[in-house]
Image: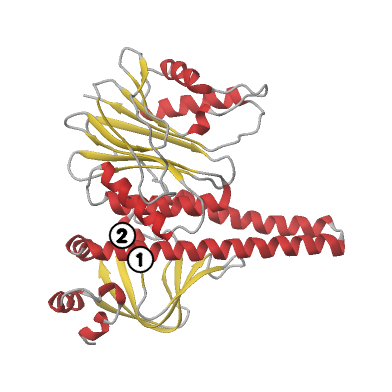
Amino acid sequence: MSVNLLSNIPLFADLPSGELDNLLRSMDTCKMRDRQILFREGDRGDDFYVVVKGELEVLKSPGTQEELLLDVLREGEYLGEMSLILPGGQRTASVRARGEVVLLSLDRRRFLDLTRAYPDLSASMVRVLSQRLDATNNATFRDLTEKNRQLQSAYDELKAAQAQLIEKERMDRELQVAADIQLSILPDELPAVAGANFGAYMVPARMVGGDFYDVFPVGENKVGILIGDVADKGVPSALFMARVHALFMSEADSGRDPTQVMISVNRHITRLQKSTQFVTVLYGLLDLSARVFSYARAGHEPPLVMSSGGTVERLPYNTGMAIGLWDVVRLDEQSTQLAIGDTLLLYTDGMTDCRDAKGNLFGLERIKTTMQNFQGCSAQGFCDGLVSTLKKFQGDSKQDDDVTLVAVQISG
């Protein structure tokens, strides 16, 4: 193989020729036969691949009745970057050869070194990821529209309840796939670090929702904390949520301050977004050595802090706007000093807006009172207790919005 092979691939086209030489020498060649599986959903991802020859099918549930073709990758396209970037590092889909295929592969260490050395590669991958999410979004809408048409036609022609039940079961399975994908994006477990412990809880209003959160190490002795709420609910907001979460994880990996990260994410969204969806977000960095939480807030609920003495206060805030609507966004930038024994709570408005059977709101003051009832619990126990109290308050009334909590407890 020659260096021209890499230079003709858009992702690597701008790399210096010397770097292309080094990159080609560090990549392994992989040959696949027709229908051979490269990896399966849930496998640990340790390699990045470039298609040199042939085609790859990106699938859910390959070889089963529920097999779903998500995409076809051809010569010059790449895959595997998400499992190398996101915490957990698991493959989110299965990949199978269509005919004979030749790949070049790059291991995790070399891939991360390359993206750090050439940040434009990360920006290029974010653009491609957004394009893939756009394609998936459009395909999902087309598929759901067609299924609705078929469902109505079956009802008009047959007037048979059985046909409706069969179609509903099929759509439920697809929604379950979407729910599984969404859950795979969120962290399987929260970081275990000296100086703090973390808790989180998310209750979607539907099978899939628009809330998201993440807690992850950023550099040395710092932890990134992210929570967001996409406008609306269901499949469209879940797809938009996946895009926003991926953009934040990519930008946060640079270690820049929260405001810079937020501005970059908004720039990507407004350049690529084709709808009126938007998202409220709070992203901050917790400095464990100084016990300082610095954050940028884009129209999201201000955090609450409970001191070791049980006093609960809402942190000071200024006006701001959600991201995703305008090229220039006004953010609320804040920083707060935390003390040993303090508990920081981030939450979405599904918590305050929850109603009981009589229409009464759970409200901010009830959150503050409930927080005091769980003083002394771990951060996760704190979240569990808040949600348990919320569900008892809600009773049999319908849940109108997603509920998401992230708690941080400062320890010595």
Question: In the rendered image, which residue does mark 1 sit on?
Answer: 80
Q: In which quarter of the image is the N terminus?
A: bottom left
Q: Pinpoint residue 368: horizontal percent, then vertical percent.
A: 44, 18
Which residue occupies the foreground of this view, 406 or 122? 122
Q: Is residue 59 left or right of residue 108?
A: right
Q: What element carries label 2?
A: helix
Q: Quadrant of residue 171?
A: bottom right
Residue 151, position in %: x, y?
A: 75, 61
Contact check, label 2 and label 1, Cβ < 8 Å? yes
Q: Residue furthest left?
A: 18
Task: State the residue at coordinates (57%, 62%).
Answer: 140
Q: Which amino acid does label 2 sit on?
A: Leu
Inspect this view and state whether residue 28 appears.
Answer: yes
Tell me which amino acid carries mark 1.
Gly
Is residue 55 placed above or below 367 in the rendered structure? below
Residue 3 x/y as whole percent: 21, 84
- Please give the label number shown on residue 84: 2
Q: In this view, does 35 lie above or below 411?
A: below
